[in-house]
Image (spheres, rainbow, N blue to C red):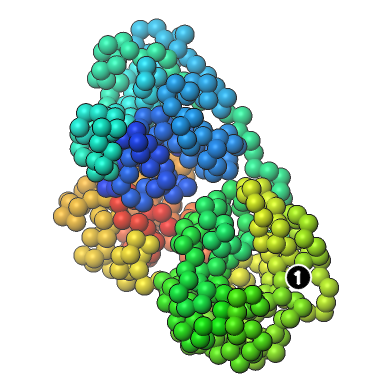
Amino acid sequence: MSVQEYAASEMRYLCGTKNPSVGYSQPRRWAWYERCDHQGWLTSTADGDCSSMVAGCYNIAFHNELGSPYTRDGTGGMFPVSDQTWTGTIPALAAERGFIDRGDSWVGSAPAGGFRVGDLLMADGHVAMAVRDIDGAFDGQDPLLAEAWIDSRGSDGWDDPDEPSGDQDSGETRLVRYADHPFTRAASWTTVLSYEGAPIAPRPETQEKEREPTVLNGIDISAYQAGIDIAAINPDFVIIKVTEGVDYVNPAWKDQIRQAYAQNRPIGVYHYIDGSGAASEADHFVSTVADWNGYVMWCVDWEQGDNSAWGSTAYLTEFIEAVKARNGGKWIMLYASAAVYPHDVAAACNTGKWIAQYADMNPHGWDDAPWTDGTWTARIHQYTGTGRVAGYGGDLDLDIFYGTADEFREYYTATYPPTTAPDGAALLDVSGVWEAKTGARFRQVMGLGTDVEWTEACKALQYFLTWAVDAYRLQSATGSQRLAVDGVDGQATWKAFQTWWNHCDIPAGHAIPLSGACDAETIKAVQIALNHSWAGARALAVQP
């Protein structure tokens, strides 16, 4: 998908969805952006304004289509996520990002050659975006416009900043035909900006370098890295501190783990022992991470600092065995410094070895063959605490995993999936039978009422697939570059779904036949996707 198409699809989604919805508020103008994942799917109701939404939609497009780091300060080609970006600055900011001003060719009702998908229409104090119709059509002379317009009380939001968030069905965000827009009728549009290929900074070479297929470079993070953008760093794996002692929880761990999961990175979680009681610490760790059991590698951090049990191999052994008793016997990775590594405990408890040893404390980048001084054999080597890599402005712990991504995930022993979907909903049985619960959950994910007729639910699926499956694959699967949004779940619809599923980074051997039939294997795929999706997302956002 092109940058323009991605931005326009995002803008149309934001202005057309009602659950969760986007309303209008200048005081909360970037709230919608904060509540979107990096692909652009809303996780909750929020607000925006006209300039933040068109700029943010292009940021999401730059990130997903060109690999621009998901920054907030305008670096890497992104529009600044701040008050620097508003209608008065958009023309200059857009010009720096590869947009051209076609206002001087505006003759009659449209610029020469007509409007284009993703065009920004500017007026004094306002901006809207040209987007496709729901059926995928685009009229270059009379396009559909998506815009944030005005709040439900007819103001900019400053008079009542406590007004409920989201669209209260008063046209706060809307889709309106160009010919019907009051600015068109009043001849108030001043110019149109068209994206023609931005000078986006590519991801730094350090992120794109080829690495040995049996060696992975990753990071381990904690609350110190709250707000980190994992996609911008592009590590091969991520290990996250979740708990410490019997009551501490890293406040950023859920955001960090969801980012890693969304990027399809192997994930580890760890607990820092402080000596508060082995069984109680194990309870705290396992209960906090329980919903991710089967999707993560379990790790324990054994260090001298803030650890009243330091030196007690009995305590460490008790903790490890207590964790294994509570997490279904999953493998434990034991972390400690090379100088004091408890090799005897690792052997007795049959743990993996994650060993910290640095050559020095100088800033250090990715390393496929870091320095070691010893005869030990580790599965993971933390080789610096002052790592500096593109995409993050501070120090990072950098680690190397000696193995492949599949071998990393073998530590998951994924037989105990989360007990709930990402939004807390009960998981569906992956039965291959379309029961009432499957239909209700499908409507919920698509942002529809549970009593909505199937034709409307099917239209929501068709619109998602039209957006999610590129034209080439749709053509190959269905014979057409567009999927009809007609509410008829025939062969074309299910072939489009099967195509989407088979290209979602599913593990080898899990593809389903391109049959066009809603058979048991296809229904299982739908159920798995629903178990990984957010309510109201209007999309199946799974990477199974």
Residue placed most toward the observer, 48 or 464: 48
Q: Residue at x 33, y 23 (%)?
A: 143
Q: Is residue 77 above or below residue 303?
A: above
- Answer with the quarter of the image where residue 438 lies: bottom left
Q: Relative to residue 483, is residue 191 depicted above or below?
A: above
Judged left or right of residue 513, residue 333 is right
Secondary structure type for disc 1: loop
Front-lying residue, 39 or 127: 127
Residue 220 pos. (x, y %): 61, 64
Q: Is residue 169 above or below residue 342?
A: above
Say which residue appears at 60% left-offset and 79% top-offset: 307
The residue at 21%/40% (across/down) is 168
Residue 43: image location, x then y, percent:
36, 51
Question: Which residue is located at x 56 percent, y 79 percent?
Answer: 274
Camera sees residue 225: yes
Residue topped by disc 1: 357
Identity, as a three-letter code, of the amino acid under mark 1 = Gln
Q: Position of residue 114 (x, y in %)?
A: 41, 16
Q: Quadrant of residue 423?
A: bottom left
Give the answer, above or below, for where 16 lies relative to 395: above
Q: Is residue 297 visible?
A: no
Q: Relative to residue 418, is residue 384 drawn left or right?
A: right
Q: Left of 163 or right of it: where is 528?
A: right
Where residue 485 sits in the image (x, y, percent)? 29, 41
Q: Nearer the viewer, residue 459 or 227?
A: 227
